[in-house]
Amino acid sequence: MPLPDSLVDTIGRAGHVCVLTGAGISAESGVPTFREAQSGLWAEYDPLKLATPDAFERDPALVWRWYRWRRALVEGVEPNAGHRALVGLARRVPRLTLVTQNVDGLHQRAGSEAVVEFHGNLFAERCSDCEQPASDPSVSELPRCPACGGLLRPGVVWFGESIPATALETAVAAAANCDVFLSVGTSSLVYPAAGLIHAAREVGAVCVEINPNPTGQARTSDFALAAKSGELLPELIKALDARPMNTIAEKR
Ligand code: BV8
Ligand code: ZN
């Protein structure tokens, strides 16, 4: 899909680009998105019901089995061209803040640094009693905290739980300071992540959605690019490199 010249120019001149990614950016790596039917033995489970404190309370062994299945799935895939293009974009703009809703760690494996993990990470664990983080991912079915014997839980943010304060502050500050806000591969249904774009729009940032299925936020974005991130983001890098060198980034 051709990239509008005006968008390439806007990004090329941006002093600060804030990127929010969702499950869609990992789709081309073979990781099912959050809302696609779970495959295989998990088909009958609804992630919206499993990713909750109640589910863990009710059946921690089942929830642990789901998270270990997801860990194994993610360990068996690679970051894709979309993840890698965001590493390239960070090298081409003065400042890039990458906020992800994903818990798969693929941005970091692609080489992105300072990733803001808005919903935590699949491979992190902490004690559900004393909150102490565990050092490495556990293997036993119901892992116990070495400090207090409490049940360890996956280090992710479940529905109904608050976003980690530092991640929230960093993401809101970046959205409210950026010149361009790129929303990539998210259905924009989960809050407060889906609210970040409003902070960007309030400061006049140019808002861009990249998603083969335009979402409710497409209408209020300056650019809604109905494309796969693994195809479009490398095109953006190519177009940025083809720009005449005399253009400089405007600091905000
Ligand atoms: C909170 C970690 C304050 C776990 C996740 C009513 C009642 C109660 C609560 C709420 C309510 N209304 C709103 C809320 C708040 C709730 C919420 O938003 N619910 C939604 C469902 C309505 N949010 C919360 O609870 C949050 N906390 O608000 O705290 C609070 C405190 C107490 C009580 C109330 C509020 C916490 C939310 C965090 C949940 N944890 N993940 C885990 O992963 O196991 S969220 C989960 O959804 C994933 O992280 C996922 O990333 C995220 C969002 O989904 P998407 O990333 O957008 O993925 P999705 O599948 O939906 O879409 C993929 C998109 O990609 C599609 O559009 C598709 O077209 C596109 N795509 C596909 N292929 C490609 C592509 N795009 C580009 N290229 C491709 N190739
Ligand atoms: Zn403990």
Image (cartoon, helix red, strand yellow):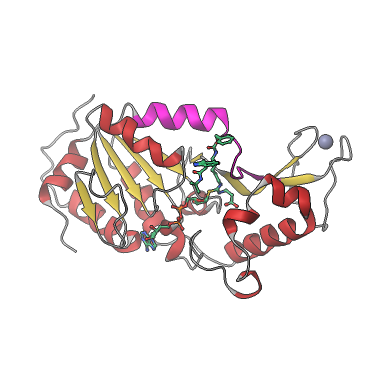
Residue 169 location in percent, x, y? Answer: 48, 26
In the picture, the quarter occupied by the N terminus is: bottom left
Residue 67 location in percent, x, y? Answer: 67, 57
Question: Which residue in the rendered view is the most extreme toward the top?
Answer: 252
Does 131 appear above or below 189?
above
In this rendering, would 79 be left or right of 52?
left
Q: How many marks?
A: 0
Question: Which residue in the rendered view is the most extreme toward the bottom?
Answer: 40
In the picture, the quarter occupied by the C terminus is: top left
Question: Which residue in the rendered view is the most extreme toward the right?
Answer: 149
Residue 148 location in percent, x, y? Answer: 88, 35
Q: Nearer the viewer, residue 245 or 251?
A: 251
Location of residue 200 by image quarter: top left
Does 31 appear above or below 18?
below
Location of residue 199 by image quarter: top left
Residue drawn at (22%, 30%), measured in percent from left and top?
204
Residue drawn at (82%, 44%), measured in percent from left and top?
151
In this rendering, would 89 be left or right of 43?
left
Residue drawn at (25%, 53%), measured in percent from left and top?
237
Highlighted magenta segment, given as a residue range: 154-175
Residue 47 lies in the magenta stretch: no
In this rendering, would 117 be left or right of 249?
right
